[in-house]
Image (spheres, rainbow, N blue to C red):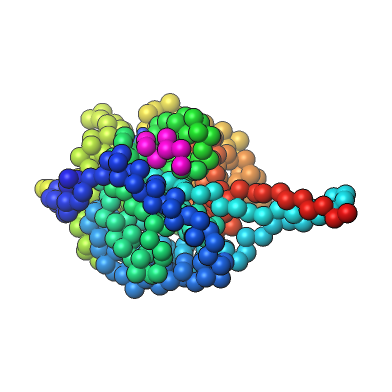
Amino acid sequence: MLEVIEPATERTLATVRRAGVEEADAAVARARAAYPAWRAVAPADRARLLGRIADVVAEHAEELAVLEARNAGKPISDARGEMGMVADVFRYYAGAPERLLGDTIPVTGGHAFTVREPLGVVGLIVPWNFPLVIAAWKLGPALAAGNTVVLKPAELTPLTALRFAELVLEAGLPEGVVNVVAGPGSTVGRRLVEHPDVAKIAFTGSTEVGRAIAAGAAETIKRVTLELGGKSANVVFADADLDAAAAAAPGAVFGNAGQDCCARSRILVEARALDDFMAALEPAVRAVRVGDPLDESTEMGPLISAGQREAVASFVPDDAPVAVRGSAPAGPGYWFAPTVLCPVGPADRAVREEIFGPVVAVLPFRDEDEAIALANDTIYGLSGSIWTRDGARALRVARAIETGVLSVNSNTSVRVSTPFGGFKQSGYGRELGPHALDAYTEVKSIYYAVP
Ligand code: NDP
């Protein structure tokens, strides 16, 4: 059995059956059996069913939000936002089955055209930081394109995925189209990667596991999309609205207790504005309300586990240059206070590695060229922000930074209708928006001879 822990209390929240390789194989077999009928569902009917999933999720949004808030330790207001996004993702991709367009291509002696075919059974492996919403980013386009799926949630946070599997049946989806297998990555996850009947793996998680998945998938030439780690830079120029940049910076790195692949865990500030920026940042960090995830006013909850807290604490040894430290509750729960490190150098561990906790490093830069060089001095390339009032500079820097997602005078990264994904070792493939469908379909070229 698998004991699911509530990170805010360290108590058992639920006990569920721990699946193994046999259950993974059975789920793949169910998905394979359901595939021919699901891909044959008329596009308008598949669209209607995806719309029903959105409705059923919206009807159960509060129940799902409380479950997610308790299991992942995230503030209830964040969890509600995530469930709203889950419903929005299915509503958005409900528009896709009837819009999977192909091309006609002029050729000699007949007609050539392309169609988009589904892949078959797709394995979805997701992490614990945004359990259901990251699953939805994969489920929406996968199902819209006519694939069937096996979803493996993280062992730490399986509860919303298991409930979702019940809700899709309530929405009218045929049995076997969505299968959820709650078991360890080392057995269930690996089996999905190796299984000859799984056509593709869509993965979100650590770069290390992503590397192993890409290597394992090579054996069967599986399609793979990877959303991996990040070390995003929040670049603040002296001509920016410094108060706005400083007020927004804590949310950009302490949101979800820093357990966010888009966390802006490096703040790069133009040297002549550093003192003013730090003066504005300090009260904003101290104001972050850390506490019970179910309290409506909470802005940051605990970390996911004791192990994660230990990993995050290793970035703040006793002699660390702590410039600001916020507050955190004492007692049970995996709490860690929001922490700002300054001064730090470009070679420091907190500047180079993904921390995945509420710790941020602040570095000064001299000019635009140095800002770009520092922002790009990382193996990752997921997200980032640029704060400036100079429009031309904003566009120059946005084009020069090697990441998949950027925002100017804002720290947002994810929208249902725009593509999301990384450069460099942050992964490959795009989720959300129109581009995600490319990763769940194959292009087929058909030539019809006309004598
Ligand atoms: P992992 O990458 O280990 O886990 C992500 C998912 O992959 C989980 O469902 C996990 O299963 C599964 N998994 C683990 N090993 C394998 C494998 N060999 N084959 C197939 N699937 C596998 O992340 P962690 O939970 O260990 O977190 C460690 C670090 O990863 C974090 O500190 C953070 O730096 C980074 N991370 C980044 C995320 C992102 O959004 N980019 C998300 C999560 C973590 P299970 O956990 O059930 O065993």
Q: Ligand 1 shows up in which quadrant of the image?
A: top left
**Mainly helix, strand or loop, the magenta region?**
helix
- Give the quadrant of residue 139: bottom left
Q: Is residue 449 left or right of residue 54?
A: right
The vertical placement of 209 against 284, above or below, is: above
Q: Is residue 217 left or right of residue 80?
A: right
Q: Nearer the viewer, residue 59 or 26?
A: 26
Magenta highlight on residue 183: no
x%, y% of residue 270? 51, 41
Q: Is residue 445 left or right of residue 335?
A: right
Residue plotted at (24% across, 54% down): 71
Q: Nearer the viewer, residue 140 or 234?
A: 140
Q: Nearer the viewer, residue 46 or 412?
A: 46
- Give the quadrant of residue 190: top left
x%, y% of residue 313? 25, 35
The vertical placement of 286 against 48, above or below, is: above
x%, y% of residue 133? 39, 56
Which quarter of the figure is the C terminus placed in?
bottom right
Residue 140 visible, this angle = yes
**Which residue ends up furthest to the front in the rendered image?**
451
Q: Which residues are magenta?
A: 190-197
x%, y% of residue 288? 29, 55
Which quarter of the figure is the N terminus placed in?
top left
